[in-house]
Image (spheres, rainbow, N blue to C red):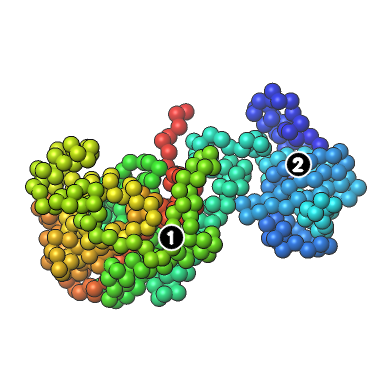
Amino acid sequence: MSNETDQPPQSTEQELIAVRREKLAKLRELGIDPFGGKYTTTTTPGELKAQFEEDQNVKIAGRVLAIRDMGKSVFFTIGDVHGKIQGYINKKGVSETDWQLWQLIDLGDWVGLEGLTFTTGRGEPSVNVSSLTVLSKSLRPMPDKWHGLTDRETKYRKRYLDLMSNQKSADLFVLRSKILSEIRSFLTDRGYLEVETPMLHDVAGGAAARPFETHHNALDMPLTMRIAPELHLKRLLVGGFTKVFELNRNFRNEGISRRHNPEFTMLEAYSAFSDFEEMAELVEEMTCHLANKFFGTEQIEHHNDEGELIRTINLSKPWKRARYHDLIKEVAGADWFDITPEQRRERAQQELKLEIGAQLEDYEVSQQVFEKLVEEHTFDPCFVTHVSKELIPLAKTNPENPKVIDVYELIINGQEISPGYSELNDPDEQRANFMAQSGGEAQAADEDFIESLEHGMPPAGGIGIGIDRLIMLLTGAPTIRDVVLFPQLKRKDS
């Protein structure tokens, strides 16, 4: 048959498009709609192959992914992101119209076919086509069959090309959806209710981050895209919900890197009458459950682009737990918290070789030590507990040491995967923390949230999990762009 694989190597994309448009016109001359309509199927290509039986009459639909033309008979492959199967069409086995139709089919076209299942001499499950339907004519050629989509920017900018030419990428995103579904089931099985809270806020809160700003015309008021759902979820605890979670988008107007995207998926969950230690156990149990269910192991391998093993992350329980101050003292000196702030700054710069901005507060100097010398070098799971009070204004103060708070920060593979708190429910202390964080600016405090606390929020434990980072961890993806279907990119120059 005639398709672009038969064209001379020097054929340009525009020449290939011209050939396809000629076929488009010929389809219409035959009275065939090149863009089809409803087509009722009995199964999918992937399901048919997975549950294959011979001598079954089936109707399936999919994209034409490969063609092996032998003149009056052709083997070809159709499929979608869930799987594929081989088809076989012979001039004597179909009507003259269907055979003419087949001559106008190219790689990338969507087709429906009906036929009888059989196994080839080589043992390949196949469908012997008796009826063919064109469902959508592809007017542009697919990515090169042998090399796929090699340009990373094109892969992210035109994800549809990546999905149709790279089964590994398609499998990852199907897996991502299944993991999200399993997370929901895991939490609902434990009594959590899924809720939805606003994405537009009049006060940005719940995290220290720069928001995206917008304006509501009808109300004539500024709004921000939410940076976290935390404060609304806690309002629900006040209202009487005792176990809630939200799995949805957050937006932060900050940098883009292999670990950051301006919009990202976050899980937050809250349990009344709990604390940060119980929530840590929940996260540990859930992560191990996901690893075992979808990968059959708690040993997660991470490879580089060349396929070389970088490291194996051990998720086996129990996970390490260590205090924030102890970890810092291991890398910065046992006397780190006994020396003066000036001495800490000098040691960080001179001995530890860290860049310490002049504007950083003393607790931020210690945080730099933690991030650069502890977090980035911690690969197996570690719950870092009892961090400095100044870092998190929404958690309870530790009753034994008022300088630290009852929280964990879960570090895996050199990055934070999940924070968890014993949630602060004292409205007066919450107001004081907000004021301290904002430098005494009363308008920066969310007074409506504080008022809700004054109605009584039960003691609770809460967690956040960066879903994109969790998927990176479980799949070994090197960058967040590999696990987000449409990552944010700079606008391409026209």
Mark 2, secondary structure of its residue? strand
Residue denoted by label 1 = 315
Identify the image quadrant of the N terminus: top right
Q: Amino acid at mark 1?
A: Leu
Residue at the farthest right position:
92
Depth order, front residue of 335/203: 335
Q: Is residue 39 visible?
A: no
Is 385 rendered above or below residue 90? below
Q: Answer above or below: position of 138 versus 325.
A: above
Q: Which x, y percent locates residue 59? A: 75, 58
In percent of width and height, residue 453 lies at 19, 69
In which quarter of the view is residue 350 placed? top left
Residue at 45% in and 29% down: 493
Q: Residue 485: image x %, image y %?
A: 49, 48
Identify the element where label 1 is drawn.
loop
> What residue occupies the far top of the structure in this picture?
10
491 in relation to 128, above or below:
above
How far is disc 2 from disc 1 in space, using C-alphas?
A: 43 Å
The percent coordinates of residue 22 (x first, y second) are 74, 32
Residue drawn at x 54%, y 56% is 175
**Is residue 468 found left or right of 325 in the rendered image?**
right
Labels 2 and 1 touching (C-beta < 8 A): no
Lower position in the chain sequence, tag 2 or tag 1: 2
> Relative to residue 43, is residue 453 depicted above or below?
below
- Identify the residue under disc 2: 67
Taking depth in this image into account, of 428 and 310 the one nearest to the observer is 310
| Pointer 2 local density, CA inside 10 Å: few below 14, some 14–19, many at least 20 | many
